[in-house]
Image (cartoon, rainbow, N blue to C red):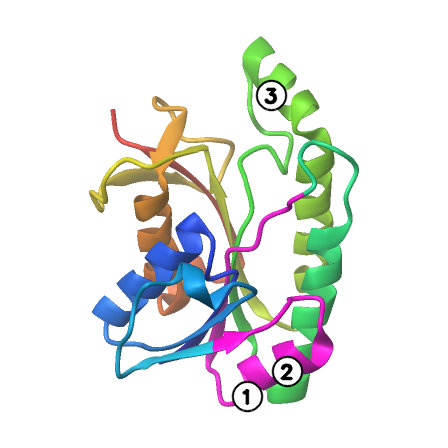
Amino acid sequence: MNIVIIGASGKTGQLAVEQALDAGHKVTAFMRSPEKLALTHERLTIVQGDATDSEAVNTALSGQDAVISCVGSNSGLGKTTILREMAGTVAEAMVRNGVDRIVYMASAGIDKEIPGMMGKLTMKMLGNVLEDHRNAVEVYKSYDFRWTIARPMGLTDKPHTGRYVETSEGIPSGSRSISRADVADFLVRAVSDDQYIYQSIGLASKE
């Protein structure tokens, strides 16, 4: 499968590139800072650009079968619309290039699904970013795409295990965190697995 990974210079994005190559895919890594990806491979193409630049995104999506989006917001906890703006640009490029499969990494809390007092406090603190993720998701859902949404709990730099809990309702029971490597595992696995189409999946590590 030909996969373009948007946000490939981020911590999760880099891991998704590595794991997609390991899985045998042909990967286009789209990123603002190519120097951050210390990786070369015969099936890897690097495209430099910003995900709000329609021409750069259109170039990256040419000839692709699917998109994995690992973009994040650099606005801290302030009000932001950058994720929605990037979603609009990517969605338009998908239409132009006949690509209809996307796996989007959002965050736990976008559906206001984290229970308890700590959950409420967390969602309030991250409210602006969660709202932007929510709006980005709605952009993708408004098109005739085969989408999958990943809702990971708190991200860590722990090793890749390939063992984690998934749920389509609320958040997984037990752990309140998951390694970026295991999130990347899910993103790469889900992009070629039809059972995840039109699913929003909560992710957490196994206790």
Q: CA distance from mark 3 to mark 2?
A: 36 Å
Q: What residue is rendered at 59% in x and 85% in y?
A: 59
Q: Which residue is mark 3?
A: 122
Q: How many marks?
A: 3
Q: Quadrant of residue 137?
A: bottom right
Residue 88 in sight from this viewpoint? yes
Amino acid type at circle 3 is Thr
Q: Residue at x 45, y 33 (%)?
A: 153
Q: Is residue 174 above or below residue 55?
A: above
- Which amino acid lies under the numbered mark 2 shown in the image of this protein? Asn
Check the image and name the residue furthest to the front.
35
Mark 2 residue element? helix
Above or below, comparing residue 161 to residue 66 in the picture: above
Question: Which residue does the numbered mark 2 point to in the structure image?
Answer: 58
Horizontal arrangement in the rendering, residue 139 relative to residue 107 (left or right): right
Q: Give the residue number, with chain letter if any, for mark 1.
A: 62
| Residue 149 counted in the magenta span | no
CB under 8 Å between callouts 1 and 2? yes
Is 71 contained in the magenta span?
A: yes
Q: Quadrant of residue 17?
A: bottom left
Q: Nearer the viewer, residue 163 or 38?
A: 38
Numbered range of the magenta stretch: 47-74
Q: Position of residue 160 (x, y in %)?
A: 23, 44
Residue extending furthest toward the top: 117
Kindly state the secondary structure of the residue where label 3 is placed. helix
Task: Report, in whole angstroms, how far the alpha carbon at label 1 lies from the one at label 2.
Answer: 6 Å
Three-letter code, disc 1:
Ser
Earlier along the polypeptide chain: callout 3 or callout 2? 2
